[in-house]
Amino acid sequence: AVVPTACYGAVLLLAALSYLVLQQTILAGLGRQSQLARAVGVDYKGKLSPVLYAVGISLAFFWPWLALIFYWTVAVLWIVPDPRIEWTLARK
């Protein structure tokens, strides 16, 4: 169904944008030279997720099954653990 698939993507997109805002707020409070900022680095997954969700939302109006594949792809990206913070703390 088109509308539920697009709405689901919108909820996912808003959650991803909230994550980015929270992360940037925390890093701004700690400073760009903090240990956490060095550990987070560029954060490709965090920046790629909203893009994939937005593409999925637009696809939902034409091919809902393809939109779900985009949503699933983001989920798979985040299932793989990101050890950057643990590595940075271990090196301290």
Image (tube, rainbow, N blue to C red):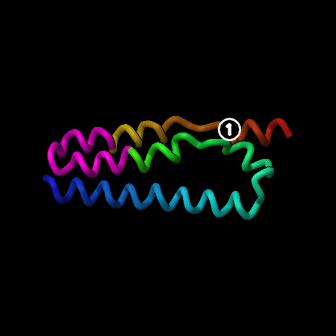
Examine the residues drawn in magenta and state their main secondary structure: helix
Image height of 3 relative to 52, above or below: below
Q: Amino acid at mark 1?
A: Arg
Question: Which residue is denoted by mark 1 in the rendering?
Answer: 84
Quarter of the image holding residue 63?
Answer: top left
Going by the image, does 34 lie left or right of 7?
right
**Residue found at the far right of this picture:** 92
In terms of depth relative to the viewer, which is nearer, 77 or 61? 61
Residue 29 screen position, x and y as percent: 73, 64
Residue 9 screen position, x and y as percent: 31, 54
Which residues, given as a range, are shown in magenta?
52-70
Number of on-image labels: 1
Residue 30 screen position, x and y as percent: 76, 60
Quarter of the image holding residue 13?
Answer: bottom left
Going by the image, does 34 lie left or right of 8?
right
Going by the image, does 92 lie left or right of 86?
right
Q: Is residue 56 magenta?
A: yes
What residue sits 62% from the left and 42% below the top? 42
Going by the image, does 62 lie left or right of 86?
left
What residue sits 22% from the left and 53% below the top? 5
- At numbered mark 1, what does the secondary structure look like: helix, strand or loop? helix
Q: Is residue 17 magenta?
A: no
Residue 70 screen position, x and y as percent: 32, 40
Image height of 18 relative to 33, above or below: below
What residue sits 56% from the left and 37% below the top? 81
**Category of crowding for the residue at label 1, using alpha-carbon neighbours closer than 10 angstroms: few (below 14), some (14–19), many (at least 20):** some
What residue sits 59% from the left and 43% below the top? 43
Q: Quadrant of the C terminus?
A: top right
In terms of depth relative to the viewer, which is nearer, 60 or 90? 60
